[in-house]
Amino acid sequence: MIVEKLALGRIKLGITAATQEEALKTVGQMLIDSGLCKESYLEALVKREKEFPTGLDMGGFGVAIPHTDVTHVNSSGLAMAVLDKPVTFTLMGMDDEFVEVKLICAMAIDNPNQHLDMVEALLHLLRDKSFLNDLAEARSPEDFLSIIRAKENSNAN
Amino acid sequence: MQIEKKKIIVACGGAVATSTVAANSVRALCKGQGLDVEIVQCRVSEIGSHIHGASLIVATSKVSKDYGVPFISGMPFISGVGVVETEKAILDVLKA
C-alpha cells in the first residue's frame, strides 16, 4: 500500500517553485529530513531528471516520479508535493515533449528488486485522473493521505 | 530443431524503477504466451554490452543509438496507455 510508504512529514501541499529544480529540491529534501535519503540525493535527483526525465501525462494531469541511484538512499519510501502552479517537466522517454506537472512523487528506492510492488502500486494509483484532481485539492496532508487510503481500499475491494 | 531462447533487453535510465516495472510486464506477457525468454534488465548506457544475441530492446527512456535490433518503447507499461498495442508489437517481434 502506498499509504504505508508515505508519512505526514513527507507530503507538502501548495508549494511554489519557479523551476523544476526548485520543485525537485523541495520534494527531495523531505526524504532527506526523514532519514530515508542521504544528503547526496538532491543533486543526484536533479541531475538524473535532466538526463532521464520522469514526467508523465496521466490523461491531461501532469505527474513526475523522480528517483535516482540506490547509493543515495538509506531505505525505501515516497515523498509527494502538490504544486501551487504547475512546473514544466520533460516526458519520460522523450527529450522534446513536455508536460505541466502538478504533482511530484519522489521515490526513494534502495533495492530495485524489492520495491517493484511500491512502484507498480504508485503507477496504478496515478492512472486515475479524478483521483489526481482530488489529491491536488486536498486541504491538508492528513486529507491527502486519507484520499489515498480511500482509493487504495476501494481498489482492493 | 531446438527453438532458441530469445533474449530481450529491458532498459531505462538507471535500472532502478521503471525498467523493473517494464521487465516484469514483459516477463508476465511472455509467460502467459508460453514463450521461454531471457530478460536482461540494464541501464540504457549498458545496452551495448548486452546486445549480443538480443532479439528485442524495450526501454522506458530514449534510445538514441541504433543497435540493429527492433526497439519498442516500454512507456505504455508505465503510463498504462497503449499496453495492448505494445504487447502485440512485442509478441510480433518474438514470434517472427
Image: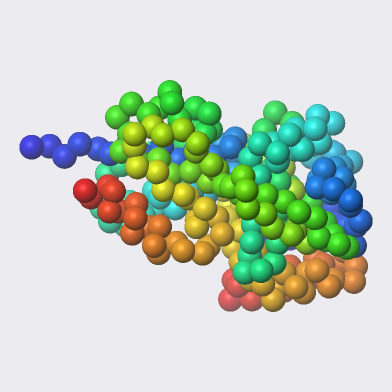
Residue plotted at (27% across, 44% down) = B36
Task: Residue at 67%, 49% (x, y): give it.
Answer: A90
How far from the left and from the top, in percent, is residue A115?
A: 61, 45
Q: Nearer the viewer, residue A82 or A156?
A: A82
Count numbered badges in the picture. Answer: 0
Judged left or right of residue A142, residue A41 is: left
**Is residue A38 something one can see in this rendering?**
no
Residue A97 rendering spot, x and y as whole percentages? 63, 53
Picture quadrant of residue B12: top right
Q: Nearer the viewer, residue B55 or A4?
A: B55
- Residue at x 37% of width, y 29% of height: B51
Q: Quadrant of the N terminus of chain B?
A: top left
Q: Is residue A85 found left or right of A125 in the rendered image?
A: right
Image position of A31 (left or right of A4)? right
In the picture shown, does residue A81 fall above or below A29?
below
Q: Is residue B71 visible?
A: yes
Q: Position of residue A69 (x, y in %)?
A: 67, 33
> What residue appears at the point 81 percent right and 29 percent down from the top-left corner?
A40
Q: Residue furthest front?
A: A96
Relative to A144, A75 lies left or right: left
Query: Outermost residue, top direction?
Result: B49
Q: Quadrant of residue A145?
A: bottom right
Residue B73 x %, y %: 46, 49
Asked where in the image residue A111 lies, by quadrant, the reply is top right
**Colouring:** rainbow
- The correct choice, above or below, for A102 with respect to B71 in the image is below
